[in-house]
Image: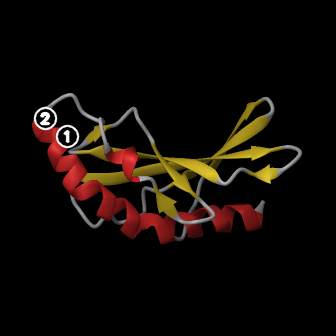
Amino acid sequence: MSKHQTQIIKTAPYQIHTISLKELVSSNKLIEFLRVEVPYGEAYGRIPFARVLYTFNGIKQEKAVPIDLDKGAFSDSSFENVFEDEVLERTFREIAPTVFQNAAPQIIEAVSKVALSG
């Protein structure tokens, strides 16, 4: 992950920094990481939670998965009730927690690099 694109979206009272994760290799072909959105408050800096956007089976998912940037962890409840289809839901719940947790260190590293450079 050598290149990181940042897009700043201005909203009060914080800004959303968008960092591309397209170079992040997933441990499962069904999940591809797209980007992480990190809120920054003017008065208090980086907020410790971000949203990870991804595709599942080639389809961009509307529901992002929140990550605790300080702990480098995802909540297990983030992987529940994502799909109405029972087969997709079961498949996602079986693989997603491990895939996302395996990617957490690289996601934290990408966020840290952008925070240090800007």
Q: Is residue 83 above or below residue 42?
A: above
Q: Residue at x 79, y 29 (%)?
A: 12
Label 2 sits on residue: 86
Q: Is residue 94 above or below residue 27?
A: above
Q: Residue at x 32, y 53 (%)?
A: 32
Front residue of this view, candidates 55 and 88: 88
Residues tagged 1 and 2 counted as in contact (Cβ below 8 A): yes
Q: Residue at x 71, y 50 (%)?
A: 47
Q: Position of residue 72 (x, y in %)?
A: 53, 65
Q: Position of residue 36 (x, y in %)?
A: 53, 50
Secondary element under disc 1, as helix, strand or loop, is: helix
Distance, label 1 to label 2, CA atoms, is 5 Å
Dot 2 amino acid type: Glu
Could you classify mark 2 by the number of other residues whose Cα lies within 10 Å: few (under 14), some (14-19), or many (20 or more)?
A: few
Q: Quadrant of residue 83?
A: top left
Secondary element under disc 2, as helix, strand or loop, is: helix
Q: Can you say which quadrant of the picture contains the C terminus? A: bottom right
Numbered badge on residue 40: none
Label 1 sits on residue: 89
Q: Position of residue 84 (x, y in %)?
A: 21, 28
Q: Quadrant of residue 100?
A: bottom left
Dot 1 amino acid type: Glu
